[in-house]
Image (spheres, rainbow, N blue to C red):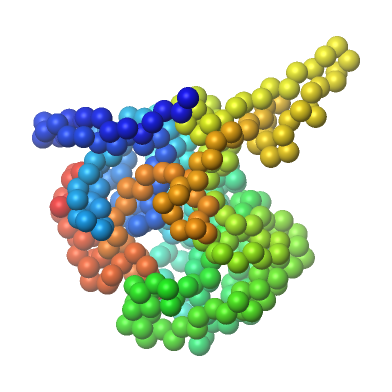
C-alpha cells in the first residue's frame, strides 16, 4: 500500500512543536528558481529536516518536512549549483531530475538575469554527464512571438541549441506563451514595452509541424512534448513535467518511492531453452536495464492542476515574487521591484526556514 502524506508533528529550530506535511515527491520549484538562487538555502533546510512555505492565496504559513522525501523535481534556468549537491542527494537516497529551461532570447534581452547561452549549454552538458541524459529535460519555454521574433526566428534559435544538446538529452518540451490568459505576463510585457503577438491555432500548428520535420531531418530524434497545451499536435506528446515514469527510471531503487507510485517491478524468467516470458511484459512497461521492467498500477495525476497539465502529485516548496532572473515575460513575479526586495531580504537571513526570510 502507498504511504499517505499525512501531517505529523516536527520540532522547529526554536523548539516549537508544529504540524508539517511529509511529501515523498517535492517540486523545487514552479514558483521560483531554487537551484539558481536558493540552492544553498534549500540543501541546508533539507539537512535540518524541514522548511516553511507561505500559501500565496491566503498567506498562511505551513511546514514541509523532508524525512520521507525520496524524489525531487528541480526547475531552473541556471541549475549549475546542483553539481555541488547531487552527491549529497545520493547519500540520502533521494533521486532527482531537472526541468532545464534553456531558451535563447539573448538578442532580444528578454532574460537579462541568466548567464550567457554558451555557459548555460555547458552547464546542461555537465549535469547530463552527472545524472544521465534522460534526467536533464530541455525546455524551450515559453515560445514568444513579438514584433522582433517570428516563427522562423524561433526555429533558428531551437536549431542552434538542439544541435549542441544532441546526445545530452532525450526530450524537448515547449509551450506557446498564452499572454492574454495570464494577467501578470501581460502586465509585465506591456510594462517592459515588449510588443507581443498572441499565438493563433494556425501558427501553433505551423510551428509544431516544422519543428517535427526539423527534428527528423537533423537526426536529433528528441521526444517532442508540449507543457499545458490543450491542442493535439501531430508528432508531439502532451508532457508530464512532474513525471512518475521518469521517477521510476531514476528512483526505482527506493522501495518507499515505488510503493508511493504504485509500481510493480517485473523480472522475466528464463527456462532451460533460453526462452523467456517477455511476451507477458506490458507494452507500456518501463525498462530499467539488467532485465528488469516496471509497471505503474496507479493513477498518480494531480487533479488540482489545470486540465491540460499531466503532472503527478507533488509538493511545491517555492514562493512567488522571489526570482531575480527578472525575465520580461515572468508569470511568477508581480514586479521586478518586489522580487528584488524579497531576494535582498533572503540574503540578510539565509538561515530562515522560509525563502523570503520572513
Is residue 46 depicted above or below 73 in this figure?
A: above
Q: Quadrant of residue 36?
A: bottom left
Q: Quadrant of residue 194?
A: bottom left
Taking the spot 66% from the left edge, 70% from the top edge, the residue there is: 208
Is residue 303 depicted above or below 163 in this figure?
A: above
Q: Position of residue 229 (x, y in %)?
A: 55, 64
Residue that extends furthest to the right in the rendered view of this protein: 273
Taking the spot 21% from the left edge, 34% from the top edge, the residue there is: 19
Q: How many marks?
A: 0
Q: Position of residue 23 (x, y in %)?
A: 36, 37
Q: Position of residue 155 (x, y in %)?
A: 63, 73
Report whether residue 340 is seen: yes
Query: Horizontally, is 293 left or right of 93 in the view?
Result: right
Is residue 113 depicted above or below 263 in this figure?
A: below
Viewer-nearest residue: 51 or 78: 51
Q: Quadrant of residue 238?
A: bottom right
Q: Position of residue 24 (x, y in %)?
A: 40, 35
Taking the spot 32% from the left edge, 40% from the top edge, the residue there is: 43
Is residue 286 depicted above or below 208 in this figure?
A: above
Taking the spot 31% from the left edge, 67% from the top edge, the residue there is: 333
Report whether residue 45 is seen: no
Viewer-nearest residue: 356 or 261: 261
Amino acid at each position: 500500500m502507498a504511504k499517505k502524506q499525512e501531517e505529523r508533528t516536527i520540532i522547529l529550530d526554536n523548539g516549537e512543536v508544529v504540524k508539517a506535511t511529509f511529501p515523498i515527491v517535492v517540486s523545487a520549484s514552479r514558483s521560483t528558481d531554487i537551484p539558481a538562487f536558493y540552492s544553498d538555502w534549500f540543501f541546508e533546510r533539507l539537512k535540518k529536516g524541514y522548511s516553511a512555505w507561505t500559501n500565496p492565496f491566503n498567506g498562511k504559513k505551513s511546514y514541509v518536512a523532508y524525512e520521507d522525501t525520496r524524489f525531487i523535481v528541480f526547475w531552473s534556468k541556471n541549475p549549475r549549483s546542483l553539481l555541488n549537491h547531487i552527491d549529497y542527494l545520493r547519500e540520502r537516497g533521494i533521486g532527482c531530475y531537472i526541468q532545464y529551461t534553456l531558451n535563447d532570447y539573448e538578442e532580444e534581452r528578454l532574460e537579462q538575469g541568466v548567464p550567457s547561452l554558451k555557459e548555460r549549454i555547458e552547464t546542461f552538458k555537465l549535469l547530463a554527464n552527472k545524472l544521465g541524459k534522460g534526467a536533464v529535460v530541455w525546455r524551450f519555454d515559453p515560445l514568444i512571438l513579438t514584433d522582433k521574433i517570428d516563427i522562423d526566428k524561433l526555429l533558428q534559435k531551437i536549431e542552434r541549441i538542439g544541435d549542441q544538446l544532441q546526445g545530452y538529452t532525450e526530450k524537448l518540451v515547449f509551450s506557446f506563451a498564452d499572454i492574454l490568459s495570464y494577467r501578470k505576463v501581460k502586465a509585465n510585457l506591456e510594462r517592459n514595452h515588449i510588443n507581443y503577438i498572441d499565438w493563433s491555432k494556425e501558427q501553433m500548428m505551423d510551428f509544431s509541424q516544422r519543428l517535427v520535420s526539423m527534428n527528423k531531418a537533423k537526426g536529433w530524434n528528441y521526444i517532442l512534448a508540449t507543457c499545458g497545451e490543450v491542442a493535439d499536435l501531430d508528432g508531439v506528446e502532451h508532457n508530464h513535467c512532474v513525471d512518475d515514469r521518469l521517477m521510476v527510471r531514476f528512483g526505482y531503487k527506493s522501495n518507499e518511492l515505488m510503493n508511493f507510485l504504485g509500481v510493480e517491478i517485473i523480472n522475466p524468467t528464463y527456462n532451460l531453452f533460453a526462452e523467456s516470458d517477455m511476451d507477458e511484459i506490458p507494452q507500456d512497461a518501463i525498462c530499467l536495464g539488467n532485465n528488469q521492467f516496471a509497471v505503474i498500477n496507479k493513477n498518480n495525476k494531480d487533479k488540482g492542476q489545470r486540465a491540460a497539465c499531466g503532472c503527478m502529485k507533488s509538493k511545491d516548496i517555492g514562493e512567488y515574487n522571489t526570482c531575480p532572473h527578472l525575465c520580461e515575460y515572468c508569470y511568477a513575479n508581480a514586479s521586478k521591484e518586489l522580487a528584488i526586495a524579497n531576494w535582498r531580504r533572503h540574503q540578510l537571513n539565509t538561515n530562515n526556514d522560509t525563502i523570503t526570510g520572513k
